[in-house]
Amino acid sequence: MTGRIPEKFVDELLARIDIVDIIDSRVPLRRAGRDYKACCPFHEEKTPSFTVSQEKQFYHCFGCGAHGSAIGFLMEYEHMTFPEAVDELAGRAGLAVPREAGPAPDAAPPPDDLAAIADALTRADRYYRRQLREHSQAPQAVAYLKGRGLSGEIAAEFGLGFAPEGWDNLVRALGADGVGQTTLVAAGLAAKKESGSYYDRFRGRVMFPIHDYRGRLVGFGGRVIGQGEPKYLNSPETPLFHKGRELYGLYRARDALRRENRALVVEGYMDVVALAQFGFDYAVATLGTATTRDHLDRLFRYTPEVVFCFDGDRAGRDAAWRAAGNALPVLHEGRQASFLFLPEGEDPDTLIRKEGLEAFAARLRTAQPLPDYLFQTLAADVDLGRLDGRARLVELARPLLSNVPPGALRELMIARLAEISLLEPQKLSKLLDRSPTGAGRNTAFSRKPAPDAGVPSLAQTALALLIQHPQLGRHAGDPQPFLVLDGEGIPLLVELMGLLNAQPNLTTGAILEHFRDSKYIHHIGRLAVRQHPMHQQDVEAEFLGLLYRLHCKANGQQIERLSAKERTGGRLDADEKAELVRLLSEKQELEREKPTRWP
């Protein structure tokens, strides 16, 4: 089903489920005081540093920094998308997930149709496998697979099948089992002629079932036997199958990716199967499309390094350059990408048979890191012996570096570009930062603090207390007066206070979910675990004192603004005079209500 999941439902869902139950069913927890502990499931450790708070409905690892709500845990641990994690928790809580208005009603079928499509795919899978064993044309398919060096065991392991020649073999076979023709079309298994009759999409092909990362059958790929075009044919886009998101062999390779800390991306499913037969079990393939950002986001959930394997011809180089461009924005938190180019006319399937596993593994160790590949490719198009050639190199690299997330890799790439272009790194960095769009920079909290450094300190401390103890929101009051203050954290503090005014029962985990797609999310995550010297009984007094000081700052700043206008000869209009009187009265009231305890 399409459409956005309402925030109100997410809040209700997180209020109903217990994060301790969700995590404990996957990572055994033991009580440690008010919280629960375990060895972190996201990095290797011997001493437990992974903490789960039942009160805050929030988890945090003090070793690797992983943190979030129950939804965030499922996304990280089970590699689910946000909607999938919500669906999982909703099913556990016995709730139906509502969707707000989204695409047109006919953009995707309702849930019962999705179930019908999944059933049709399962029945087709059984049909294709049976044809490989029983059909009169099967010997030519078997001969083709043997000719490619595949064993019967590996063919069975990957569930290979056969679609015999003939216009409507599958349509008639599944129709007899009660599968409707329109369902076959929706599943990408059949197509409709202008005359109104239906025919099989796959004919005369060896069939490769395609599963998503959770192991669900979502489509098929077919390789023609003998001559014919197209050589490879994949299922069309369907409600269950999206080429830009799925990777052939990923479900099977998941454990191997974690074991090897590396994924090899190849161009075809025959390469994946052949490599697996030789014991090389961490290869995946794109499905007739260039490597996308979605592909890479999915892979990097399992492994920190991706190696792209392409032919060394012009088409392979072009594909590599597109993959490099899509990889740059996701290379953060230590992620790596490399490129392996094979001899012209070879692919992983033929090369591993010719050279063997060890030689292929040795080639893999020579893969070129993405930064080296990027600069080598750019440098090949300029004359580095000329000043204007080096200047052109910098301009060619500028939009690419702007897509690299802020961090160590970006700084090292700038240093490498400075070395090649013979520019000082600091001057080059300033030059690159002058990009009109400022692309690639995380500006959420990059503004310089106001001259009065106390305001950001007050706001950040108030934010930390409010995020860690959302019940303090009942004391927040109207946050609008704070908007006149200039300092980091003020806009977020005002937004959070407004949220808790409207929804006072949110937990720390629920707050994180509210800001999941916000520019503030990483800042909130850090504040959620910031250590604070106040004891539990002092938190409320601390927070009230912070609010008082912020109100005083805001009041004083507004009074000074109006008073300064009068001092410099400007005349206040009637509204401004009334505002100044109100502010002076408010100042007196604040002085009378001065708390006896100060932060």
Image (spheres, helix red, strand yellow):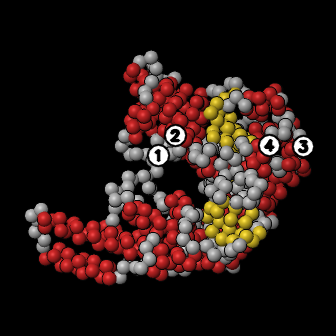
Identify the element where label 1 is drawn: loop
Pointer 4: what residue?
281
Percent x, y of residue 426: 42, 34
Q: Label 3: few (<14), some or many (≥20) within 10 Å?
A: few
- Asked if residue 552 is positioned above or below residue 523 in the image, the reply reads below
Amino acid type for the residue under numbered disc 2: Arg
Rounded to the nearest angstrom, the CA distance separating label 2 from label 4 is 32 Å
Could you tell whether 264 is left or right of 544 in the image? Answer: right
Q: Nearer the viewer, residue 385 or 580?
A: 580
Q: Nearer the viewer, mark 2 or mark 1?
A: 2
Residue 440, numbered circle: 1
Residue 439 sits in which quadrant? top left
Q: Earlier in the sequence, mark 3 or mark 1?
A: 3
Pointer 2: what residue?
410
Q: Nearer the viewer, mark 2 or mark 4?
A: 2
Identify the element where label 3 is drawn: helix
